[in-house]
Image (tube, rainbow, N blue to C red):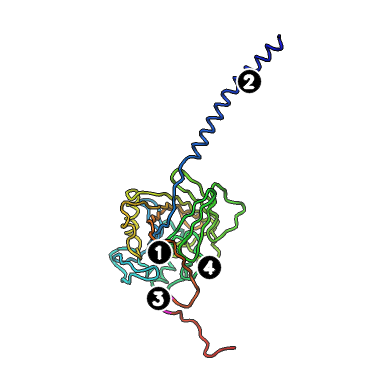
Amino acid sequence: MYLQRNLVLLVAVVTAAAIPAAGQTASHAADSEAETAAPIPDFAGVWTHPAFPWFEPPASGPGPITNLSRWAEQIPSGPAGSAALPPSDHGGISDYDQLVGDYKNPILQPWAAAVVKQYGELSLAGITYGNPSNQCWPFGLPFIYKQATVQLLQQPDKITMLYSGDHEVRRVRLNSRHPSPLKPSWYGDSIGHYEGDTLVIDTVGVRNDAPYRMLDLFGTPFTENLHIVERYRIRDYEEVKDAIERNRKENWFFVGDVWAQHPSGKFMQVHVTIEDAGVFTTPWTATLTYAPSPDLLQEGACAENPREYYNNKDTDLPKAGKPDF
C-alpha cells in the first residue's frame, strides 16, 4: 500500500512537471512556425538601371565620388555612345565623355585622391584610360553595377544574379558565413539573409590584384579591406521618387528616363554601404533604384578587338610591312 501511494504520487509529480514543458515546446514551435511563415520578398523579373555613372548620391551624409565635368542636359544615346555635348560651365549631369572624379571629396585618403586626380587628368587630355569595361575584363564588385540590367533567381539556399553583359554572374549563399581563410575572387564572397521585406547581402574578399581594378568609372581604387553591404527591397514609386530625382540630377540616362514610365509601379531599390579602411576616411552610402524591364535578359559578350567603340575608330596598333613567316 505504501509503495502504491508513492507510485501514484510520483506519477502526479511527473505529469505536473511535464505540463509546462509541453506548453513551452508548443510555444517555441509556434514561434518557429511564425518565423518560417514570414513572407520572403519576391524579386522575380528583370530589372534595369540604365544610368552612367550608376550611384545615386544619398540625401545626406558621405556619398560616392561624382563627376566634376558636366553636361548641361539629358540627351539619350546608347550604352556605347555619347550625348555629344560640350562640357558645361553651369552644372548639369555627369559628362560621360570626360570622367573627372571629384578628388577633393573628403571620403578619400590622400593617396587615393591622387589616383582619382591622375585618371581625371588623363580624361581631360582626351585619353580614354583602361577600365574593366573597355578592356573586356571581369567587372567585379562594385564595378558590376555598370551592367545596367540584372535578373535575380531566388532559391531556398542561394541567390543567383545574372547580369546583362558578358555573362557575368554573382552567387550569394543564404544563411551562411564567410569562410576563413578566404581566397579573394572577382566578385568576392557574398552571403545573404532576409530581414523582413529586405534581402541583405554582405560581401568581402573582392580581388584587387588584377589589372584595371577600380571601384567606379573614375578609377577610385580599393584594397583587400573592401566591405560592401547591399540591402534589396521592392518599393513603391512614392518611396523612391526622391532617389530617382537625385539620380536624374547626377547621372546620364543613356536610353532615356525609364523610371518615368512607371509612376505607379514597383521598383527594386538597392541601398549600398561601402567601407574600406585602406582607401576611405569613412564608410559611405548610395542607392541604385531599378525599374522593371519589359525585355528579357539578353546575352552580351565583350570580345577583344582593335575597335575603340568609345572613339568610333580602330586602335593604332603596330603593323608589319610584310609577313614575318
Task: Check if residue 20 falls in the magenta segment.
Answer: no
Q: Position of residue 54 (x, y in %)?
A: 40, 60
Of helix, strand and loop, which one carries label 1? Answer: loop
Disc ID at residue 14: 2
Instruction: List the residue tagged with mark 1.
Output: 101
Mark toward the start of the polypeptide (1 vs 4): 1
- Mark nearest the camera among 1 and 3 is 3
* Residue at 43% over, 45% down: 197
Task: Please report the bounds of the magenta region as a residue range.
Answer: 308-313
Q: CA distance from mark 4 to mark 2?
A: 71 Å
Q: CA distance from mark 2 to mark 3?
A: 85 Å
Of helix, strand and loop, which one carries label 4? Answer: loop
Amino acid type of the residue tagged 1 in the rendering = Gly
Instruction: List the residue tagged with mark 3.
Output: 311
* Residue at 56% over, 24% down: 20
- Mark nearest the camera among 4 and 2 is 2
Amino acid type of the residue tagged 4 in the rendering = Pro
Q: Position of residue 28 (x, y in %)?
A: 54, 32
Other-residue count near label 2 (Cα within 10 Å), few / some / many at <14 / 14–19 / ≥20: few
Q: Quadrant of residue 52?
A: bottom left
Q: CA distance from mark 1 to mark 4?
A: 20 Å
Disc ID at residue 211: 4
Vertical placement of 71 versus 283: above or below? below
Mark toward the start of the polypeptide (4 vs 2): 2
